[in-house]
């Protein structure tokens, strides 16, 4: 099974051979497999002294290496975009998490859980529980004012274009299997809108398509 992650919530995805699409077991988001970025084996080269805008790189994320490119050179780091993932995953990283592409790869960190047998699958499950499920559970118990969400479809109309939505506008957003109260932050050039879930930390802000938004 190839090591990939959900471009919606970041959970690990398990891919069987010859699979065309895969659904995230955590957020239920469906992906086209060919459009997803795939982890590569750990590079054995040292970090480069500097990287330039537009340069292809390998970037470390939660113990695995992913193909990416540099968007901006910033004080103390680099803004990178992961190949095959939405811009909501862009992040600023230090040079210690970057390596030049095209370098010889080691086999000390296999990119497929199958290469290490049942242990690899167990590690993947453990990482999923540790990195995704546990933070959500802890957040729910530590924030008594966190929204529970509703399974009922909101009565508000679906916006036909991002231009209908203005910053600060109250909306309902579909996430997982529930609708959550949210607030519009900005309209994105690609037709999506960036929203903030009411009562949740800013780390849950995301860019969503209009089919997941209803006016309140």
Image: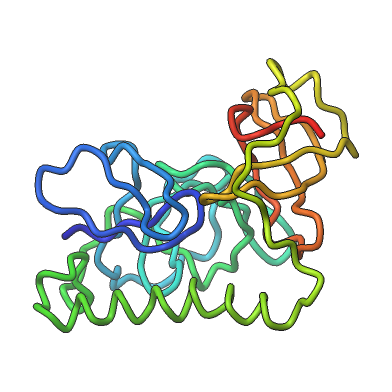
Outermost residue on the right side: it is 168
Total labels drawn:
0
Q: Position of residue 73 (x, y in %)?
A: 66, 52
Q: Residue at x 55, y 67 (%)?
A: 95
Q: How is the image coloured?
A: rainbow
Q: Residue at x 48, y 75 (%)?
A: 131
Q: Residue at x 63, y 37 (%)?
A: 153
Q: Position of residue 49 (x, y in %)?
A: 52, 65
Left of 170 or right of it: where is 80? left
Observer-nearest residue: 86 or 95? Answer: 86
Q: Is residue 133 above or below residue 10?
A: below
Observer-nearest residue: 144 or 51? Answer: 144
Left of 2 or right of it: where is 161? right
Observer-nearest residue: 59 or 84? Answer: 84
| Quadrant of image for the C terminus | top right
Q: Is residue 9 above or below residue 63?
A: above
Q: Position of residue 12 (x, y in %)?
A: 36, 63
Q: Residue at x 63, y 27 (%)?
A: 210
Q: Position of residue 135 (x, y in %)?
A: 58, 77
Instruction: Tell me where residue 191 sits by quadrant.
Output: top right
| Quadrant of image for the N terminus | bottom left
Left of 128 or right of it: where is 141? right
Instruction: Tell me where residue 13 sits by quadrant.
Output: bottom left
């Amino acid at each position: 099974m190839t090591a990939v992650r959900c471009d919606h919530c970041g959970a690990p995805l398990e891919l069987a051979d010859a699979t065309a699409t895969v659904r995230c077991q955590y957020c239920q988001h469906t992906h086209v497999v060919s459009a997803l970025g795939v982890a590569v084996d750990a590079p054995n080269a040292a970090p480069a002294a500097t990287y330039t805008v537009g340069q292809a790189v390998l970037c470390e994320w939660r113990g695995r290496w992913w193909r990416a490119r540099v968007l901006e050179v910033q004080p103390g780091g680099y803004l990178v975009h992961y190949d095959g993932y939405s811009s909501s995953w862009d992040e600023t990283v230090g040079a210690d998490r970057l390596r030049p592409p095209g370098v010889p790869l080691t086999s000390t960190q296999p990119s497929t859980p199958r290469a290490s047998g049942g242990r690899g699958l167990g590690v993947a499950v453990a990482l999923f529980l540790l990195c995704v499920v546990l933070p959500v559970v802890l957040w729910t118990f530590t924030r008594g004012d966190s929204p529970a969400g509703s399974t009922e479809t909101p009565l508000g109309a679906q916006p036909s274009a991002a231009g209908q939505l203005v910053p600060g506008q109250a909306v309902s957003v579909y996430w997982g299997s529930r609708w959550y109260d949210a607030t519009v932050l900005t309209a994105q050039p690609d037709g999506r809108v960036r929203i903030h879930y009411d009562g949740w930390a800013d780390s849950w802000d995301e860019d969503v398509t209009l089919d997941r938004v209803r006016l309140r």
